[in-house]
Amino acid sequence: MSEVTRSLLQRWGASFRRGADFDSWGQLVEAIDEYQILARHLQKEAQAQHNNSEFTEEQKKTIGKIATCLELRSAALQSTQSQEEFKLEDLKKLEPILKNILTYNKEFPFDVQPVPLRRILAPGEEENLEFEEDEEEGGAGAGSPDSFPARVPGTLLPRLPSEPGMTLLTIRIEKIGLKDAGQCIDPYITVIFSLDLNGIDLTPVQDTPVASRKEDTYVHFNVDIELQKHVEKLTKGAAIFFEFKHYKPKKRFTSTKCFAFMEMDEIKPGPIVIELYKKPTDFKRKKLQLLTKKPLYLHLHQTLHKE
């Protein structure tokens, strides 16, 4: 085992134990955060195509299954149902498997799939970095129905507990304006909170459910996003990024079409519209290119909560 792989397994193990500890202590928001962050790292490794990986294809499959179990536990903690579908004691059975992944050769204890059928790109990642201008003018999907099926639940997190003198922010994503709105298949928005100017992700990523409907040049969401940090604790240069994603059936993966961002001086109660930029997402905000010259924007509404 190389030093790189040993260090990687140690980090995974530490993250797993943190999440399980939070879970057992009843700190559900922190547990969900830790589970989702670790699941994202495991999924990335499970889907990696690089040749210098020490993991075999079978081991990658097991890593992907562990990621799925982390997501199932995270979903169970967010569920309003009284009976949890995936219990903490079930999840704890996976810690020795993850620790000994290089030598594990038994049947996986749960009947789960290692990765989703559709490839979901990580925040800021883009498989095809070329600007696909032909997409903007027309293409497959123009005849799709006006309402989208609600089959993607999203990964939205609950509001943090209130603290005296501290402010929490709720952002309602109302709609996004796109000239080819009717051609977007299974569109949703990934929200990446509190990236500083170095591009460091300071809070968990959240995905909205698939859009509720489309109308003319708009894709409607009408969902609330809870900032997972008190406004007073945001770092200098922080921003909130919104990546609009949609499924490409010909390429069989979900792609980022455009992005928008909101900086800290724009946090104020009430409606706001922000401009859309061409992919790939520029977290450092240095090489921004507007998506279109037309008056099409991301429409948001902000609510501040203070004790």
Image (cartoon, rainbow, N blue to C red):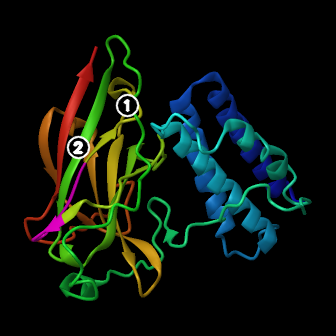
Question: Amino acid type of disc 2?
Answer: Arg
At 90% from the left edge and 63% from the top edge, which residue is drawn? 105
Q: Which residue is mark 2?
A: 172
| Element assignment for label 1 | loop
The numbered disc on residue 62 is: none
Q: Earlier in the sequence, mark 1 or mark 2?
A: 1
Residue sitting nearer the eye, 190 or 232? 190
Asked if residue 117 lies left or right of residue 188, the reply is: right
The numbered disc on residue 159 is: 1
Label 2, residues with CA under 10 Å away: few <14, some 14-19, many ≥20: some
Label 1, residues with CA under 10 Å away: few <14, some 14-19, many ≥20: some
At 68% from the left edge and 37% from the top edge, which residue is drawn? 88
Residue sitting nearer the eye, 53 or 197? 53
Residue 280, image quadrant:
bottom left
Report the Cα–Cα distance between label 1 and label 2: 13 Å
The answer, for residue 73, to whether it is visible in the render is yes
- Residue that lies at the very extreme toward the top in this rendered image: 164
At 80% from the left edge and 59% from the top edge, which residue is drawn? 108
Residue 215, image quadrant:
bottom left
Relative image position of residue 11 (x, y in whole percent): 73, 45
At 25% from the left edge and 89% from the top edge, which residue is drawn? 139
First to last magenta residue range: 214-222
Please identify the quadrant where the C terminus is shown: top left
Instruction: Indicate whether residue 219 is drawn in magenta.
Output: yes
Relative image position of residue 89 (x, y in whole percent): 74, 37
Residue 153, image quadrant:
bottom left
Asked if residue 179 lies left or right of residue 6, the reply is: left
Q: Is residue 18 shown above or below 285?
A: above
Question: Amino acid type of disc 1?
Answer: Arg
Please identify the quadrant where the N terminus is shown: bottom right
